Amino acid sequence: MAKIKVQNTEVTIITYDDKDYISLTDMVRNIENGLALIEKWLRNKNTIEFLGMWEEMYNQDFNSPEFEGIKNEAGLNRFILSVKQWVEKTNSKGIVAKAGRYGGTYAHKDIAFEFASWVSPQFKLYLLKEFQRLKEQEQAQLGWTAKRELSKINYRIHTDAIKQNLIPTEVTAKQASVIYADEADMLNVAMFGTTAKIWHEQNPELKGNIRDYASINELICLSNMENLNAVFIDQGIPQGERLIKLNQIAIQQMRVLEDDGNRKLLK
């Protein structure tokens, strides 16, 4: 569930059937007799035709014969239709009624934008703007989560190689942590040209570590380097030689990823 603010109106967005559904109830909450607008819109013949076309495109369980009967009645003075009746008669998926704390009438974003346009074209434009902003934030968060998970997986491969090849038996956990940190810092130098300690000293206002501020391309490259370093460790290559090899690989891979020829080789 998420909330966006549209012209001083807080609108709830939920995930239903893996799709975004927007609260029609919230859209009209600050309008006098707003809830009545939903059923008024639903009784509109153009609305019925739009909803029917949407359902036939996306809902294989849609009750088309029942829909045809509703469409034929739409526009008559005696025609009455509630959200509940529409859902029950047609097996609609585009509009759903939710109970509970965040209850109300929700509609698939395609339908919600159509309703917003009917209520107010200006409101629809602001709704579209805020909805897009929310999706961009979610994508950014998804990318961040993915790259951190990628780093964790490769970090495990890397630390296992260190444990099996570089840490002698009968050492304390504290002594082992020094070896892990030393190898991690070797990768930091190969990739970023600095150690974690120096980076913290140069960026005292930043929380987290140097890898938290890496780009997705840098983290992809770093993940590759962790795998390669694990292989080099298994092969018994000394750390100094591994550092030079990995720095050269980092430069080559980052040039491919970013077409950047400005990085300097370590000497």
Image (tube, rainbow, N blue to C red):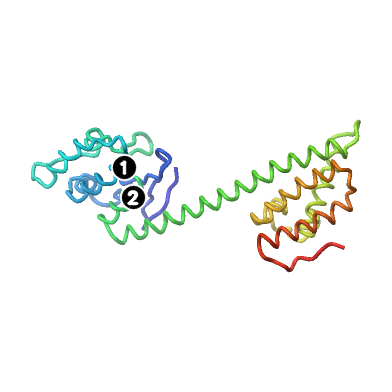
Spot the residue most to the left: 77
Tell me where residue 246 appears, x and y as whole percent: 80, 54
Pick whichever of labels 2 and 1 is earlier in the sequence: 1
Q: Which residue is drawn at 82% across and 46% down?
A: 181
Quadrant where the N terminus is found in the figure: top left
Spot the residue most to the bottom: 262
Q: Decide: marks 2, 1 in contact (CB < 8 A)? A: yes
The residue nearer to you, when weighing 227 against 96, is: 227
Query: Mark 1 falls on what kind of element?
Result: loop
Q: Which residue is drawn at 17% across and 40% down?
A: 68
Q: Image quadrant of residue 258?
A: bottom right
Q: Residue at x 55, y 53 (%)?
A: 140
The residue nearer to you, when weighing 167 against 165, is: 165
Which mark is on residue 174? none
Tell me where residue 22 appears, x and y as whole percent: 36, 46
Q: Mark 1: few, some, or many residues within 10 Å (few <14, many ≥20)?
A: many
Horizontal side of residue 185 vs 35, given as left or right: right
Horizontal side of residue 173 vs 74, given as left or right: right
Q: Name the residue under label 2.
A: 110
Total numbered circles: 2
Q: Mark 1 points at which residue?
A: 94
Badge 2 amino acid: Asp
Horizontal side of residue 150 vs 114, given as left or right: right
Badge 1 amino acid: Gly
Q: Mark 2: few, some, or many residues within 10 Å (few <14, many ≥20)?
A: some
Tell me where residue 104 appears, x and y as whole percent: 32, 40
The residue nearer to you, when weighing 65 against 140, is: 65
77 shown above or below 89: below
Horizontal side of residue 65 vs 179, given as left or right: left
Quadrant where the C terminus is found in the figure: bottom right
